[in-house]
Image: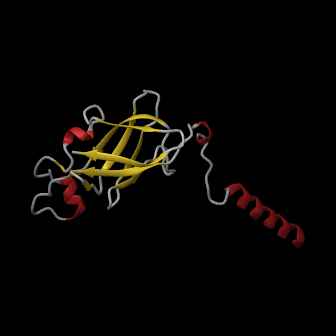
Amino acid sequence: MRFVFKTFVCLSCGLSILGSGCGKTPDQWEAKRPKVVPASGIVKYSGEPVAGATVVFSPVNAEGIAASAITDSSGRFELIAFPPNKGAVPGQYKVSVTKIEMPAVPKGAKGAEAAHDETPSGPPKYLVPEKFGDPETSGLSADIPPEGKKDFDVTIN
């Protein structure tokens, strides 16, 4: 009886480890997604890298898949269409870049709860001109080739 119990426990543990896929949960939709390729680059405004900007590649084709990223401290980005996996779907895109500084919370507010209860003291400040935050008005575009591209230069003047 003891042998049967130990065998059952060992088999149960082994099957649960195999079934877990080494910690990766299978994504039922992953097989239906379009193929993604590496897509990265740098954002510059007035010749300087822009840290902390949101970059969005919006497909020109209505059936396309958008991809986005936030630039690092050196203005570099890696697009992501299907988080958390990096990469974007090849195609033609309109590009937008946004970097906003929120106004300070009024004096007297204390802690995170007060920040939610208080009204900001003014409108947000656009650190990149507002028109670049809309893919229709930014004037920026990009083509991601089937092999991907790692040197997009998104320059804003």
Q: Residue at x 57, y 40 (%)?
A: 35
Q: In this image, 59 relative to 3: left or right?
A: left
**Quadrant of the image for the C terminus?**
top left
In this rendering, the count of numbered labels is 0
In the rendered image, residue 28, in percent from the top left (x then y), is placed at: 61, 42
In the rendered image, residue 16, in percent from the top left (x then y), is placed at: 72, 59
In the rendered image, residue 113, in percent from the top left (x then y), is placed at: 23, 59
* Front position in the image: 110 or 52: 52
Q: In this image, 145 relative to 10: left or right?
A: left
Give the vertical position of 15 relative to 125 (above or below).
Answer: below
* Front position in the image: 52 or 10: 52
Give the vertical position of 75 relative to 132 (above or below).
Answer: below
Q: In this image, 152 relative to 110: left or right?
A: right
Q: Find the residue positioned furthest to the bottom.
A: 2
Q: Residue at x 15, y 54 (%)?
A: 103
- Chosen colour scheme: secondary structure
**Quadrant of the image for the N terminus?**
bottom right
Q: Residue at x 67, y 57 (%)?
A: 20
Q: Find the residue positioned furthest to the top.
A: 62
* Front position in the image: 75 or 25: 75
Give the vertical position of 47 relative to 65 (above or below).
Answer: below
Q: Residue at x 10, y 63 (%)?
A: 108
